[in-house]
Amino acid sequence: MRAPMHQSGSRTMDEYALLIWRVRVVAKAQERPPRAKYKEGVITPKWLRDLAKLSSFDEGPRLAQEYLSRSGVCLVVEEHFKKTYLDGAAMLCVNFPIVALTLRHDRVDNFWFALLHECIHVAKHLRLDRLFIADNLEDKSRAGRQEEDEADQGAQDALIPPDAWATAAVRSTHSQDDAIEFARQHSIHPAIVAGRLRRETENWRLLSGLVTSGTVRHHFEDQLN
């Protein structure tokens, strides 16, 4: 637990609050360890894309937890502590990697982006001298950091394939119907399409009905309580 804690973002997280949050996450993970043993290389672009497709199901977040477990990764949900500014973290436990999410912004698009971002950290950036990576994903100062850029881009591409997005009608029409149809064609939740368009245009009023149409917290009440 005293290993260096790598943080993304310009706001310095309270180190003691972060340590206690981390202890809580590890305790939960040890209570419910993954079903399989983690193997290096299991997280591939196809694995990430298949994970993203689970978002199209009503029980997608729970299915994601099971999907990770079958690959040896433990998904834990623990609310962020004051002055931690956490959206998620990736860490190595004694026997398996952990992806931890706070649901600080309890929206479908945030959940899936944060989940995939942390999975990429697990696959590419965790190592014996880097056991813990904490993320504040809304902090724009992360841009330009190689590991954060790689995790952002990988998550974005897994959620929406670049070639499909390049020709997506919704990018020009900003139509809710086009967003829903694009989501159907690519087996993802419509909120993910809305979130991508809003970030790309920096117009946070676009497709607000799709973004606020669903939350994630209720899928993990057993952990949050």
Image (cartoon, rainbow, N blue to C red):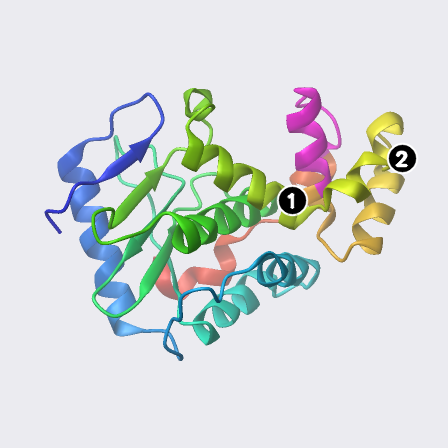
Judge by depth and name the residue closer to the eye, 112 or 6.
6
* Extent of the magenta region: 193-208
Q: Is residue 142 visible?
A: yes
Q: Is residue 192 left or right of residue 169?
A: left
User: Residue 201 appears at what percent x and percent y?
Assistant: 71, 21
Q: Quadrant of the C terminus?
A: bottom left
Judge whether 64 appears above or below 7 on screen.
below
Q: Is residue 4 left or right of residue 182?
A: left
Let me know if residue 225 appears in the view: no
Q: Amino acid at mark 2?
A: Ala
Label 2: element kind: loop
- Quadrant position of residue 51: bottom right
Q: Earlier in the sequence, mark 1 or mark 2?
A: 1
Say if the magenta span includes residue 198: yes
* 79 with respect to 13 (left or right): right
Magenta part, dominant SS: helix
Q: Measure the alpha-carbon separation of dots 1 and 2.
A: 18 Å
Q: Nearer the viewer, residue 155 or 217?
A: 155
Q: Residue at x 84, y 54 (%)?
A: 185
Q: Tell me: 182 left or right of 215.
A: right
Q: Secondary structure at mark 1?
A: helix
Measured from the top left, where is residue 79 in percent x and y? 34, 47
Q: What residue is shown at x 54% (from left), y 64% (from top)?
A: 64
Which residue is farthest bottom? 35
Above/below status of 13 relative to 89: above
Instruction: Name the residue that disc number 2 marks.
Output: 169
Residue at the (20%, 66%) spot, across then down: 94
Kindly identify which numbered label has been placed on residue 157. 1
Amino acid bearing label 1? Asp
In the displayed orientation, state which residue is furthest to the left.
2
Q: Which of the 4 image quarters holds residue 166? A: top right
